[in-house]
Amino acid sequence: MIPTATYPPQFPRPAMGGYRYFFNGQEADNEALGEGGLAGYEFRQYDTRLGRWWGVDFRSEFLPGISPYSFSYNSPILFVDSKGKAGVITVTQSPNGGGKIVIESIIFVYGEGASAAAIEANNTWGEGVNQGFNTYTYYDENNKPWIVTVNVTFVVTESLNNNKTVDDNLKDISELNCQVTGVDPLTGKEYSYNSPGYGGSMIAALVHNTQELQQYSGQLRSAMGWGGHGGGLIAIGAKQFIHEMFHGFGLRQHLTGKEDEQDVLFTYGGGVHIRAIHFIDFCENILKLYKNGRFENGIPSTYNSDFIETPSDMIEMKEKEQAERKALYEQESKQ
């Protein structure tokens, strides 16, 4: 028989007055399980003895391949889960190369008619999802496939001040002057604000004319909407939300082309179709940051020059390159 021994858990040495903070900077709950036995997060509690949560991930339905009790997708160095709720982007690498990328976002809609707008936006997005438009297979420089998926939910919030611009509301949130909560008008499910920007939560204001658009955005605009990668969106009508949402993800370019292409970032936001180049740009930028270990709070940041879009004159070349890599992958797979 192999002898075994049980060792008590080891905790950081107390500093002056006691050390209250543990993994991910969370404060320890010393009453329930003894000193250092439980870390209290906003949405659930983490048992340091078992190395798992007491409750399931609030967004577990979007991540069927990962245990709802795992911490930070089992990659706590890469992902930060500061509230015990969920990360906002998942990069899962396969042992033989390639893997999966999941981008998630909750859009909090406010303004007159927000409930109807959120329902319309969810239905429009859902129709596209049923057609598989939110998933794409990207082939990297080694011809390995990465499946990228975009998951989005539009919810209604009454936490924000309709008399303020989106910029001012975002400032209030960042300074913790208000707690943003929202409800999915279709399911009644409740949500709370995560982090803004690429793949995180976004604040969306519904307006009815260009004058309101200027007021809410704090900028002079004559278009149908405005979207900033800091997490703020304004749109005249629900259909524009999806167009502006992709600007919020960091895509700044209005593609030019034929109206029948119906690209989500076509100049007038025509249709709900995501052209391959958007997924290509997502993957190239995310994987570059992923390989360099440059994630900010669990998500790649668009506040720097790392997010690069393909110029219009190179789009066809990039799409052709993907077709060639796919053919090489399929050829290699048969060998």
Image (cartoon, helix red, strand yellow):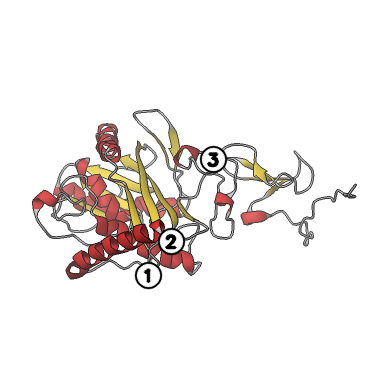
Query: In the image, what residue type sits under mark 1?
Result: Asp
Query: In the image, what residue type sits under mark 3?
Result: Asp
Q: For mark 3, what is the residue? A: 57
Q: Residue at x 44, y 59 (%)?
A: 98
The disc, 1 or 2, on the residue closer to the chain's N-terminal end is 2
Q: Circles 1 and 2: CB distance less than 8 Å? A: yes
Question: Which quadrant of the view contains residue 310?
Answer: bottom left
Q: Residue at x 40, y 57 (%)?
A: 333
Question: Which quadrant of the view contains residue 16?
Answer: bottom right
10 Å crowding of disc 3: few (<14), some (14-19), many (20+):
many
Determine the CA span between mark 2 and mark 3. 21 Å
Q: Position of residue 264 (x, y in %)?
A: 21, 50
Question: Relative to 318, is 45 above or below?
Answer: above
Q: For mark 1, what is the residue? A: 306
The disc, 2 or 3, on the residue closer to the chain's N-terminal end is 3
Q: Position of residue 233 (x, y in %)?
A: 28, 50
Is residue 104 visible in the rendered structure shown here? yes
Query: In the image, what residue type sits under mark 2?
Result: Pro
Q: Residue at x 31, y 68 (%)?
A: 308
Q: Position of residue 17 (x, y in %)?
A: 78, 58
For label 1, the SS is: loop
Determine the CA span between mark 1 and mark 3. 30 Å
Q: Position of residue 37 (x, y in %)?
A: 75, 45
The one nearer the camera, 45 or 260, is 260
In this image, 32 relative to 173: left or right?
Answer: right
Question: Relative to 335, is 180 above or below?
Answer: above
Is residue 82 visible in the rendered structure shown here? no
Q: For mark 2, what is the residue? A: 300
The disc, 1 or 3, on the residue closer to the chain's N-terminal end is 3
